[in-house]
Amino acid sequence: MEIEFIEEKENKLFNRKEIKFYVDYDGEATPKVLDIKSKLVALLNTKKDLLVVDNVQPHYGEPRALGYAKVYETVDDLQYIEAKHILAKNTEPEEEPAEDAEEE
């Protein structure tokens, strides 16, 4: 999976940086939001708590997708501005304890 940045602009009103990018994933399935988020955190040299992948739209018939992400200045800004469903898809699922072994 490779990421190519198209546009990066500063949004001072919301105290964030907005980024549009292409994701190339030749020979692979469409990458998950959390995989893209991890790669963007490494490329942009930011913290995982401050970055939100808003959406990823695959191109029909091509191993390429257009994405939109936001990097906030503070965690408080992120939690105040972003919708709950966007935060939910950018949060890693918590592992549930195995109950099968304890029931028997």
Image (tube, helix red, strand yellow):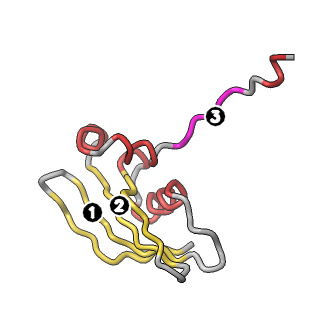
Q: Which residue is mark 1?
A: 18
Name the main secondary structure of what is drawn in magenta. Answer: loop
- Residues drawn in magenta: 92-97
Q: Is residue 33 above or below residue 3?
A: above
Residue 69 numbered mark, or none: 2
State the image coordinates of residue 95 (x, y, percent, origin top left): 63, 34
**Local secondary structure at mark 1:** strand
State the image coordinates of residue 39 (x, y, percent, origin top left): 50, 62
Kind of residue at disc 1:
Glu
**Local secondary structure at mark 3:** loop
The quadrant of the image that shows the N terminus is bottom right
Kind of residue at disc 3:
Glu
Of pointers 1 and 2, the one earlier in the residue sequence: 1
Q: Which residue is mark 3?
A: 95
**Local secondary structure at mark 2:** strand
Residue 74 numbered mark, or none: none
Which residue appears at 25% of the width and 60% of the height? 17
Of pointers 3 and 2, the one earlier in the residue sequence: 2
State the image coordinates of residue 11 (x, y, percent, origin top left): 17, 59
